[in-house]
Image: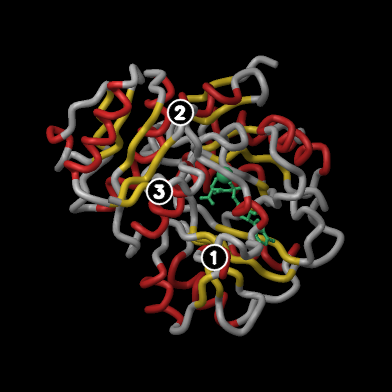
């Protein structure tokens, strides 16, 4: 399949009538799949009511069929079509964070969405992305759009159109290239089907922000206990992994440098994942500074691009600094731990 690349400037007016957006929307209406920028990462969109379209999403990504998709909407009125009820707490979260990086799990109306999109669950994940191109595409096609991150399953999520093409060129109808995404880590997934909201996946909206909006917020046991079964099926998979083994390192820069030297003396090519503050401290084969530690948002923005860069340079092993578990640092650490397959070295 020839994958189209539609470049579109997210700042131009009247995006809904932009020829590139209209072209992409027409493919969605024909049940083809198209990648689109969102404020978090690029998504691979398809008509959520079509089994054929949803099957193409799973096939292009090589995604396990038991991992349900997030349904993207542009207007809250769309919820009535496929959601059974919206509790007050969910309304409050939508008021506070939509459009934005928050996915809300609600009870679904049976018989509307493709069963494949929800992996046969009685619930559905929904979000309204905060990106002008995504919103224009959703409005123009008028459909609820199922969209997982537009990467091959297991790889770091894509934060620009090149990442999407690296993984999916020839496998999808096209990609709307709206430049680099902003947040850099995926949306926070919150289950609102019980009385107290439960974070199933940390992401762009922080736990602290959620608490400020709705009070008490719980965290799925699987986020802290490796043995617990996650309520978000996708959280059980190893994800975001670079090709080389990645180790999280808890300790001083000197300790991390000593690990680098040990591996280099064995003839291995060693990579270090750090931030701008510490980049000059390390001597290794590839030292990558991912944002600034003093502003964790910048680390989130650059994280997946940094993980992908280690692949381009073919390092044999990667050592990464750790980050505080607060604010967006919670999502950063969650993704790094998954990328590392929980491999941790403590000084
Ligand atoms: O920022 C994002 O959320 C991006 C952009 C493209 O919107 N999308 C994204 O989708 O990250 P994906 O498919 O990579 O992750 C969706 C997560 C998975 O962990 C999945 O298991 C969970 O949401 N999920 C989806 N439906 C669910 C449901 N009904 N109950 C529990 N978890 C669900
Ligand atoms: Mg994903």
- Of the two numbered discs 1 and 3 in the rendering, the one whose residue sits closer to the viewer: 3
* Residue 199 appears in view: yes
- Of the two numbered discs 3 and 2 in the rendering, the one whose residue sits closer to the viewer: 3
Residue at 76% over, 35% down: 31
What is the secondary structure assignment of the residue under circle 3? strand
Compared to 129, does 134 lie above or below?
above
Nearer to us in this view, 123 or 305: 305
Left or right of 333 on screen, residue 239: right
Marks 1,3: beta carbons within 8 A: no
State ligand 2's quadrant.
top right
Q: CA distance from mark 3 to mark 2?
A: 15 Å
Nearer to us in this view, 96 or 252: 252
Quarter holding residue 246: top left
- From the top left corner, tell me how far across and down residue 247 is, in percent: 39, 41
Q: Which residue is mark 1?
A: 225
Q: Which numbered circle lies on residue 24?
A: none
Mark 1 sits near ligand 1, with its Cβ under 8 Å away: no
Marks 3,2: beta carbons within 8 A: no
Q: What crowding class fits label 1: few (fewer than 14 Cα within 10 Å), some (14-19), or many (20 or more)? A: few
Q: Which numbered circle lies on residue 244?
A: 2
Q: CA distance from mark 1 to mark 2?
A: 25 Å
What is the secondary structure assignment of the residue under circle 1? loop
Residue at 50% over, 53% down: 129
Q: Which residue is mark 3?
A: 344
| N-term mark: 1 or 2 | 1
* Residue 39 appears in view: no
Q: CA distance from mark 1 to mark 3?
A: 15 Å
Quarter holding residue 35: top right
What is the secondary structure assignment of the residue under circle 2? loop
Residue at 60% over, 32% down: 152
- From the top left corner, tell me how far across and down residue 194 is, in percent: 65, 80
Left or right of 83 on screen, residue 295: left
């Amino acid at each position: 399949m020839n994958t189209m690349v539609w470049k579109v400037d997210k700042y131009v007016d009247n995006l809904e009538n932009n020829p590139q957006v209209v072209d992409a929307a027409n493919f969605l209406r024909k049940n083809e799949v198209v990648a689109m920028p969102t404020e978090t990462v690029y998504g691979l969109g398809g008509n959520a009511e079509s089994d054929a379209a949803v099957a193409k999403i799973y096939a292009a990504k090589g995604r396990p069929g038991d991992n349900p998709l997030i349904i993207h909407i542009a207007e809250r009125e769309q919820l009535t079509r496929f959601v059974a009820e919206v509790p007050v707490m969910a309304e409050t979260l939508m008021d506070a964070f939509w459009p934005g990086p928050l996915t809300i799990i609600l009870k679904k109306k049976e018989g509307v969405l493709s069963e494949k999109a929800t992996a046969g669950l009685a619930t559905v994940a929904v979000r309204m992305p905060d990106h002008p191109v995504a919103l224009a595409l959703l409005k123009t096609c008028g459909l609820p759009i199922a969209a997982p991150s537009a990467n091959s399953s297991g790889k770091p999520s894509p934060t620009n159109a090149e990442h999407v093409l690296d993984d999916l060129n020839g496998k999808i109808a096209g990609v709307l290239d709206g430049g680099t995404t902003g947040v850099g880590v995926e949306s926070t997934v919150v289950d609102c089907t019980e009385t107290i909201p439960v974070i199933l996946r940390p992401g762009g909206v922080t736990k602290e922000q959620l608490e400020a909006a709705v009070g008490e917020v719980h965290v799925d046991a699987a986020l802290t206990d490796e043995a617990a079964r996650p309520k978000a099926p996708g959280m059980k998979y190893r994800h975001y992994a670079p090709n080389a083994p990645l180790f999280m390192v808890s300790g001083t820069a000197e300790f991390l440098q000593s690990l680098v030297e040990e591996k280099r003396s064995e003839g291995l090519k060693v990579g270090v994942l750090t931030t701008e503050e510490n980049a000059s401290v390390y001597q290794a084969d590839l030292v990558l500074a991912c944002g600034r530690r003093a502003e964790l948002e910048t680390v989130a923005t650059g994280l997946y691009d940094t993980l992908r860069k280690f692949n381009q340079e073919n390092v044999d092993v990667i050592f990464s600094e750790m980050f505080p578990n607060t604010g967006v640092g919670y999502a950063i650490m969650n993704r790094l731990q998954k990328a590392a397959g929980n491999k941790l070295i403590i000084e």
